[in-house]
Image: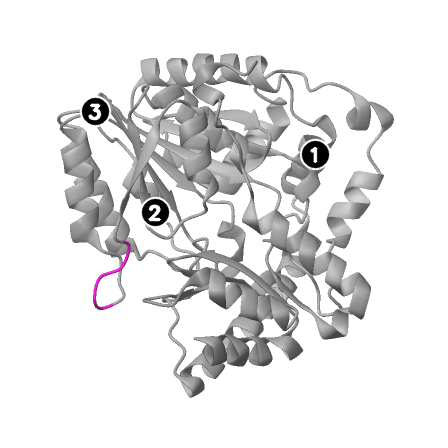
Amino acid sequence: MVINKYKDKKIDDQVFIFSKKAKEKKEEIGKENTINGTLGIFYNEDEELHILDSVYTEYKNLNSFDIFGYASSIDGDEKFKEAVKICTLGKNYKNTYKNNFTEVIATPGGTGAIYNTFQNYLNDGEKVLLPEFMWGSYKVIAKECGGNYETYKMFNKENNFNLETFKDSVLSLAKVQRSLVIVINDPCHNPTGYKLSKKEWTKIIDILKIASECTNVVLLRDIAYSDFDETPIDINDLFISLPKNFLVILAFSISKSFSSYGLRVGAQVAITSCEKIQEEFLNANKHTGRGVWSNISKSGMTMFSNLVLNKNNTLLKEREYMITLLKERADIFINTAKNINLDILPYESGFFLFIPLQTTNYNIISKKLEDENIYITGSDLGIRIALCSIPKNKIKLMAEKIKKYL
């Protein structure tokens, strides 16, 4: 009964499959005998879901209407949209973007922001441009929205961002597509932990400006993990006064930075030099939201807005604990990898790091690790390690076991 184009539609999400296996094994033989490096969820050193006290307290203190009521608008409550702009564009955004237009659409997590963007800016059959190392759901969402994808080699021989292959792919697609959607997940790239420099960002924008001379350009910057960047850089000045057919969209989420994965609260943030493009963005994405999910969790939006607008400093201190712990875990893995000659891609910060595979079959490695009660995810390109979920006392062993089977 399914319509023809969806006859073969199915998904086997490896991350959730392996996460379920890890949980079942943990219940069977105890957490001390298992290692779960699958999901992008932050666990403390006791391997329990890490909850931010300030977030939990604020949520518990919401009144019944804020918990159970509808949001005031399809595109999100006004306080929520203001709080999102402050978090993503900076406290001084009104001055920074005084000659530009900014708009916010509330979405169900960062995934909703990505879906909205692909749905409204990717023409049927067109390809979204992705790096070879990526969050796999980008590909799923692109196809769900009637498009497809193309990838470029992400790193050069010096293990820096491969601007040459990026430029070639951008200009090649720009010549044959009515619109070009490019996804860049930065900082704290999933799955490598790489971070672009200001110089790299400047060159990326220059390349996209050239592409805008022959097609519409939509840069989707996925900033889901940005609050875990140890040394943030300000690139807002690069998004000022771009060509009128060059739209920047930020995919924002409270899942990671507020440890609020299940609330499903996120947003699209648009930056444009053209008022007409701003109006199109608001109208099209509100329409999609109404037709797909209708309304975003009022409780999640209100909790987030209260914490941001009331300048809760406790939240920042609590997040520092997470950043510090991620660095400590990463340092253990990286130092161990150096000692045992285990290659990893360049990592700077974030929830994940990545071990590239050259000739070894990922499925074979995964099965051997599973036999030792170690659960990871990845692909033929390599193995993704979720540092966010592995306690420090298990990381060295995990790296050694991976090296053993490589």
Front residue of 80 and 289: 289
Rounded to the nearest whole Å, what is the CA distance between mark 3 and mark 2?
28 Å
- Region rendered in magenta: 154-158
| Coloring basis for residues | one colour
Residue 17 lies in magenta, yes or no?
no
| Alpha carbon separation for disc pair 3 and 1 | 38 Å
Relative to 201, say whether 193 is above or below: below
SS at badge 3: loop
State which tag comes first along the sequence, 1 or 2.
Answer: 2
Closer to viewer: mark 3 or mark 1: 3
Given residues 76 and 371, the one toward you in this image is 371
Q: Where is residue 116? Give x, y as percent.
A: 47, 25
**Residue lying at 34% horizontally and 31% vertically, measured from the top left:** 148
Q: Say if mark 3 contacts mark 1, CB within 8 Å.
A: no
Q: Residue at x 43, y 87 (%)?
A: 339
Q: Is mark 2 on a helix, strand or loop?
A: loop
Q: Position of residue 299 (x, y in %)?
A: 74, 31
Secondary structure under tag 1 reads helix
Most frequent secondary structure within the magenta stretch: loop
Q: Mark 1 points at which residue?
A: 300
Task: Give the label on residue 177, or none.
Answer: 3
Q: Which amino acid does label 3 sit on?
A: Gln
As drawn, is 239 to the left or to the right of 256? left
Which residue is at a point 26% across and 31% down the rendered structure image? Answer: 241
Which residue is denoted by mark 2 in the rendering?
A: 235
Q: Is residue 157 magenta?
A: yes
Q: What residue type is labelled 2?
A: Ile
Query: At 36% across and 67% down in the image, what residue appears?
Result: 346
> Does residue 398 appear left or right of residue 383 in this picture?
right
Tell me residue 349's x, y (percent). 47, 63
Rendering coords of residue 57 (x, y %)? 81, 46
On the question of residue 349 being in view, the answer is no
